[in-house]
Amino acid sequence: MSTALSSPDDIHGRQLASESGSAWSAGASWDIAGTAAHIRRGFRRVALQFPDELLGLAPGVMRALEAELRAAATDGEPAAQLFVLADTSFDGYQLDFVAAQHVAADLLVHYGPADLNAHGPIEARYVFGDEPLDVGGVAAAVAAFFSADQPC
């Protein structure tokens, strides 16, 4: 394998997520049921796009989506073929309609932060993720950083 095509784990200075990392194991929701319901509206070839820092989640998200689609299928087969787009030269926030068209996708599902002004030749679904927030921890950090007598 050529090392010229490999990316470091902290490409663009962002920490990469993995199935064992915080974005998956801490209970982040990647809207598997909602995405599967969207796919079951008649899409047959679905491209899944992750920015570099979330690419490590792709296998887990894909397995979960396939299981959700298979569970709802009458014949036990998923409703659609899923493809992971992994073009690390792309900035990850723009929807990569060209790569999706290369696999003849009829739906592009983009995970993570995204440019919401994108328009392309195929339908797109955005999944931003929903990580749990430790409200008490945030409040303690703010209180430790700001003092009550300090002006805003």
Image (tube, rainbow, N blue to C red):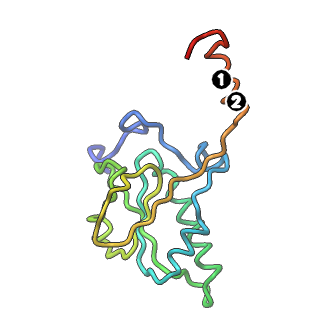
User: Hey, which residue is sitting farthest bottom in the picture?
Assistant: 75
Query: What is the three-letter code of the residue carrying label 2?
Result: Gly
Q: CA distance from mark 2 to mark 1?
A: 6 Å
Quadrant housing residue 135: top right
| Label 2 packing within 10 angstroms: few (<14), some (14-19), many (20+) | few
User: Hey, which residue is sitting farthest right in the picture?
Assistant: 136
> 106 left or right of 31?
left
Q: What number is the disc on residue 83?
A: none
Q: On screen, 133 above or below 90?
A: above
Residue located 33% across and 50% down the image: 88
Query: What is the three-letter code of the residue carrying label 1?
Result: Ala
Q: On screen, 14 above or below 82?
A: above
Q: Give coordinates of residue 77: x percent, y percent.
A: 56, 84
User: Hey, which residue is sitting farthest front in the picture?
Assistant: 151
Q: Please, what secondary structure does the residue beneath circle 1 have? A: helix
Q: Nearer the viewer, residue 100 or 140?
A: 140
Determine which residue is flagged by label 1: 141
Q: Please, what secondary structure does the residue beneath circle 2 have? A: helix
Residue located 67% across and 13% down the image: 148
Q: Give coordinates of residue 137: x percent, y percent.
A: 70, 30
Q: Are marks 2 and 1 in contact (CB under 8 Å)?
A: yes
Q: On screen, 152 above or below 135?
A: above
Quadrant housing residue 139: top right
Residue located 62% across and 16% down the image: 146
> 111 left or right of 144?
left
Q: Give coordinates of residue 152: x percent, y percent.
A: 55, 17
| Label 1 packing within 10 angstroms: few (<14), some (14-19), many (20+) | few
Determine which residue is flagged by label 2: 137
Q: Give coordinates of residue 95: x percent, y percent.
A: 34, 58
Q: Nearer the viewer, residue 145 or 31?
A: 145
Residue located 35% across and 43% down the image: 7
